[in-house]
Amino acid sequence: MSPAFLRLWGVPIMLAILTAIGLVAALLGDGVWDAVSGVALGLPVLVGIWHSLRKQDR
């Protein structure tokens, strides 16, 4: 993969994988799976909040 492709799509692909892991973990069971699910589904939300609140350099 080219560096330009990864620079553009690296983070969205990583967030999609984290979301998929979180959804699967939520279906698997209780206990540790709940914690894995919470972290994996919470990180994309935190990234979105951080991205929306940061200052834009223009």
Image (cartoon, helix red, strand yellow):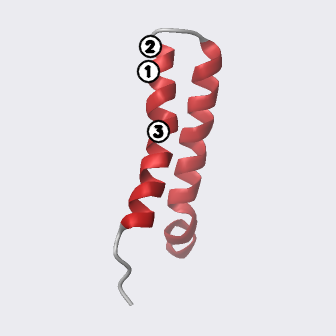
> Which quadrant of the figure has residue 13?
bottom right
* Residue identifier under label 3: 42
Q: What element carries label 2?
A: helix
Q: What element carries label 1?
A: helix
Disc ID at residue 45: none
**x and y, in percent, of residue 37 in the image:** 51, 26
Q: What element carries label 3?
A: helix
Is 15 above or below relative to 32?
below
Distance (Cα) linking label 2 and label 1: 5 Å
Tell me if mark 1 has few (under 14), some (14-19) or many (20+) residues whose alpha carbon lies within 10 angstroms of its own: some
**x and y, in percent, of residue 18 in the image:** 53, 40
Distance (Cα) linking label 2 and label 3: 15 Å
Distance (Cα) linking label 3 and label 1: 10 Å
> Disc 3 marks which amino acid?
Gly
* Residue identifier under label 1: 35
Disc ID at residue 32: 2
